[in-house]
Amino acid sequence: MNNQEFTEKYYIRREKGNSVKWQRGRKEKCLPMWIADMDFKDDERVIFALKDFIEEGDYGYANLPQDYYKVFIDWHKRRNDIEYRQEWIRFTRGAVDAMYQIIYSLTDSSDGILICTPLYPPFKATIKESGRKVYESKMINNDGFFTFDYKDIEKKFRSKKIRMMMLCSPHNPVGRVFKKGELEELFDLCHQYHVLIVSDEVHSDIIMPDQEFIPSLAFRKYRNEIISIVAASKSFSLAVFSHCHVIIPNAKLRKKFIEYQRHNHLGSVNAFNALPTYYNYLYGEKWLDSLNNVVFENYEYFRKQLGNELEISTLEGSYLIFVNIGEYSTESSAAKCLQKDCGLLVNAGETFGKGYDGWVRINLATSMDNVKKAVRNIKKLIRNKAAD
Ligand SMILES: Cc1ncc(COP(=O)(O)O)c(C=O)c1O
C-alpha cells in the first residue's frame, strides 16, 4: 500500500471526538500537532477482532489470551531479534505509571536519578514527584543530531549519589535511534558506577528506513542491570487502553517490583486493555510498516521545505521532530509564536529542558495535507521575519 492509499484508508477526522489533541485544536482554532498520538486508525482486522469481543458480550473476569506472551515474545524476536522471557514481564497501566512504580520500588528517597535532556517532560516530573533528586545531562547537539555527553555523565556519576539512569530509546523529542556503540559506552559507564538503567522503549516500533533499533536488553552482559519499558501504545496509537510491559530479567529486582505491586494492589493486568496490543501484534505488522513510510515521507517533506532555514532534529525513530524556530520567533516561547502566528499547536521546547525556549516538538503522525499546511504557515512566518 502506498502512502496516499494508507492515508485515504486510515486517516481519521478526529475533530468531533474526544481526542485531547484535536479538542484543544478546536478550542484554540489551530491545527494540532502536539501530544504523541496519531491521526490514523488501526488495521481493520484489529478493529474487527475488538468488535467481535464487544459483541460476544462476555464481560466477566478474564485472563489474557492464552498465547498472549508468545505473541508478545515473537513480535520482539521477529522485529528486534531479542528474546524476552515470560517470567521477566510485568504489567502497568502505562509507561509513566511504570516509571513511578520502578522509582518507588527500586530506589530510596535519597537516591539521585539521571536523565539526558531535552527529554519528554514526565521523566523529570515522575522523579521529582516521587521525591528523588533529578540530575540532568544536556545532550550534545550537532546541527540537530543529538547524542550523549559521556564526559558530563561520568562527572555526575562520579560526584553525585546517582543510582538510576532513565533512558529514552528511541529518544523523544530528538528522534534518535541510538547506535550500538553509543549505548555500549553509556552502559559501560552505568555499570562502572553501579547505576541501574531504565530504558523507555515505547517508540521502538516507529523506526525510519535504514535505521536499526537495538533494545537495551540486547546487551546480555548488562541484562541484570537493565529494566525496559515496552508497549504497543505508540506503535498503534493505543493510549486510551493504558497497557504497558515492564521487563525485568534480574530476579532480585523483579521480586522487589512485584512486592511493591502487591502492596499497592497493582499486580493484576486488565485483560480487556491488553487486547488491542495482542491483536495488533497479530495483525498489525503490515500496517505498521506502511505507517513508518508515511511518517518518513512527512519528515522528508518537512526537511526539504524548511531544512535550509531551520535546525531540525534527525528523525531516526518515533514520529516526533524537534525544531529550532528561535531565530524567527516573535515570542520568547517559540510554541506560543507558532500558535499565534501560524495557527499551529505544538509542544513547547522549554518543557523538555532548560534553554530550549526557541524549540518546538512537532508530531508528524498525520496526513501529508496537514504537514503541508504546517509548512506553509511556518514559511509565512519566516518570510515575514525576513521582510522586517
Ligand atoms: C517516551 C515516552 N514515554 C512514555 C510516554 C507516555 O506513555 P503512557 O501514556 O503509556 O504513560 C510517552 C508519550 O508520549 C513517551 O513519548
Image: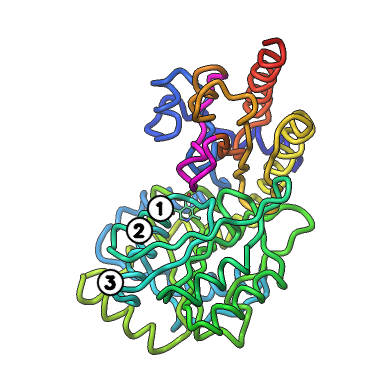
> Dot 3: within a 10 Å radius of its alpha carbon, few (fewer than 14), some, or many (20 or more) residues?
few
Instruction: Using the rendered view, name the quadrant where residue 100 is placed.
Output: bottom left
Q: Amino acid at mark 3?
A: Ser
Magenta includes 220? no
Image location of residue 273, percent across then percent down: 37, 57
Which residue is the site of mark 2?
A: 126
Image location of residue 211, percent across then percent down: 75, 59
Residue sitting at 62 percent across and 26 percent down?
Answer: 370
State the separation of the CA atoms marked 2 and 3: 13 Å
* Res 109 label: 3
State the separation of the CA atoms marked 1 and 3: 18 Å
Q: Disc 2 on helix, strand or loop? A: helix
Residue contact at pointers 2 and 1, CB within 8 angstroms: yes
Mark earlier in primary sequence (1, 3): 3
Q: Which residues are magenta?
A: 342-357
Instruction: Using the rendered view, name the quadrant where residue 285 is placed.
Output: bottom right
Which residue is the site of mark 1?
A: 122
- Observer-nearest residue: 3 or 199? 199
